[in-house]
Image (cartoon, rainbow, N blue to C red):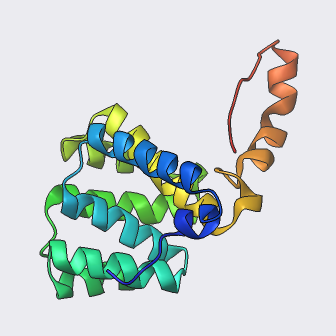
């Protein structure tokens, strides 16, 4: 399609690793319960919110082919086009919210995803996909860039109450 994916650029010197990464992504994608349009909405909204012009072009094209050009242009602008289904709209809004600040997502946003038919597993997998895109854009921030300030705010409470915290924030 004219675009070279980031993993190909990173692992071109190791074709075995590049193929392994493709296989892993394929395996993860098989179990993810997103339609082609829903996946394109998530990734296009994420890369646009991350101000990634290269991936915005590539995923804007994918979304235009899966839906139409007006939908793709709207999602890339940060709009929620009327042509999007309830599920697609909820995904676009969730994606933008997670990219802005993963720690500021609200119960209302999660409930909107559930009301649109997404399970907690679906929401977790989509969220990790979004955070993975954000981490790829800026690997120094990890998966959740706001995690350390939040931990700092809660640390005294955790220690005082003997609470152990096990995390993977990238």
The residue lying at 50 percent from left, 49 percent from top is 21
- 3 left or right of 115 in image: right
Give the camera-side residue of 28 and 80.
28
- 70 left or right of 100 in image: left
Is the residue 131 above or below the residue 5 in the image?
A: above
- 140 left or right of 66 in image: right
The residue lying at 39 percent from left, 57 percent from top is 94
The residue lying at 39 percent from left, 65 percent from top is 43
The residue lying at 42 percent from left, 61 percent from top is 95
Is the residue 15 above or below the residue 62 in the image?
A: above
Which residue of the protein is positioned furthest toward the top in this rendering?
162
The image quarter in which residue 28 lies? top left
Give the camera-side residue of 58 and 85.
58
Residue 109 seen from this side: yes
Q: Position of residue 36 (x, y in %)?
A: 20, 59
Q: Position of residue 2 (x, y in %)?
A: 37, 84
Report the number of numbered marks: 0
Give the camera-side residue of 66 and 6.
6
The image quarter in which residue 84 lies? bottom left
Is the residue 91 above or below the residue 41 in the image?
A: above
Q: Position of residue 33 (x, y in %)?
A: 24, 42
Is the residue 120 above or below the residue 74 in the image?
A: above
In the picture, the quarter occupied by the N terminus is bottom left
In the picture, the quarter occupied by the C terminus is top right
Q: Position of residue 62 (x, y in %)?
A: 27, 75
- 170 left or right of 107 in image: right
Residue 78 seen from this side: no
């Amino acid at each position: 399609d004219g675009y070279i994916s980031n993993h190909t650029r990173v692992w071109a010197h190791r074709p075995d690793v590049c193929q392994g990464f493709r296989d892993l992504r394929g395996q993860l994608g098989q179990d993810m319960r997103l339609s082609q349009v829903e996946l394109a909405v998530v990734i296009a909204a994420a890369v646009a919110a991350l101000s990634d012009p290269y991936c915005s072009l590539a995923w804007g094209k994918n979304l235009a082919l899966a839906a139409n050009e007006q939908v793709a242009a709207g999602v890339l602008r940060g709009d929620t086009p009327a042509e999007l289904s309830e599920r697609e709209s909820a995904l676009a809004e969730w994606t933008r919210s997670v990219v802005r600040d993963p720690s500021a997502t609200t119960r209302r946003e999660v409930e909107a995803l559930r009301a649109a038919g997404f399970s907690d597993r679906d929401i977790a997998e989509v969220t990790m996909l979004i955070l993975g895109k954000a981490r790829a854009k800026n690997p120094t921030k990890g998966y959740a860039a706001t995690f350390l300030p939040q931990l700092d705010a809660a640390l005294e409470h955790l220690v005082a109450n003997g609470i152990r915290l096990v995390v993977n924030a990238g």
